[in-house]
Image (spheres, rainbow, N blue to C red):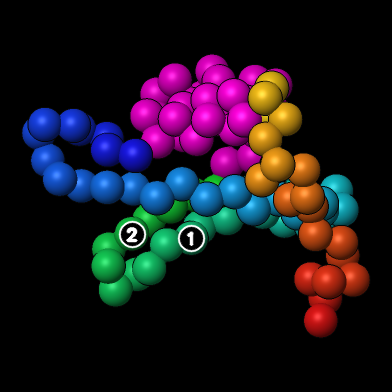
Amino acid sequence: MYPSPGGTDEYIKIFLWEKELERKELNELKKKLAGTKTAGELVTVKIANYEQLWRIAARDSKALAAWSLYEALKRKRHPDLTDTRVSRKQTDN
């Protein structure tokens, strides 16, 4: 996606990765700091209910674009969205 078409040539790729987590694993992610210190990044992980994501994404164009694209492809039953889940056994190897 181009966050500022015409204003900059910045391009952001949008990826989809889904993984089922246990409640404990999910709670461990809440407010976790992430990012690369050497690049001066300070990112706080925020867990959101998917049904309410649009409210949060409305303030973040990248998240809103990713959410909108996912919803549109899901409605069209796009083949790229039919087998996106990875079993726990596959991720533990």
Which amino acid is tagged 1?
A: Ala
Q: Residue at 40% of width from left, 50% of height from top?
A: 13
Residue 49 placement: quadrant: top right
Residue 32 belongs to the span the image colors magenta: no
Q: Are marks 1 and 2 in contact (CB under 8 Å)?
A: yes
Give the residues in magenta.
46-73
Which amino acid is tagged 2?
A: Glu
Q: Residue at 52% of width from left, 50% of height from top?
A: 15
First in residue order: circle 1 vs circle 2: 1
Is residue 93 in view? yes
Is 43 placed left or right of 3 in the picture?
A: right
Q: Position of residue 88 (x, y in %)?
A: 87, 65
Identify the residue under disc 2: 41
Q: Nearer the viewer, residue 53 or 69?
A: 69
Q: Position of residue 22 (x, y in %)?
A: 87, 53
Q: Nearer the viewer, residue 14 or 49?
A: 14
Identify the residue under disc 1: 34
Q: Nearer the viewer, residue 16 or 46?
A: 16
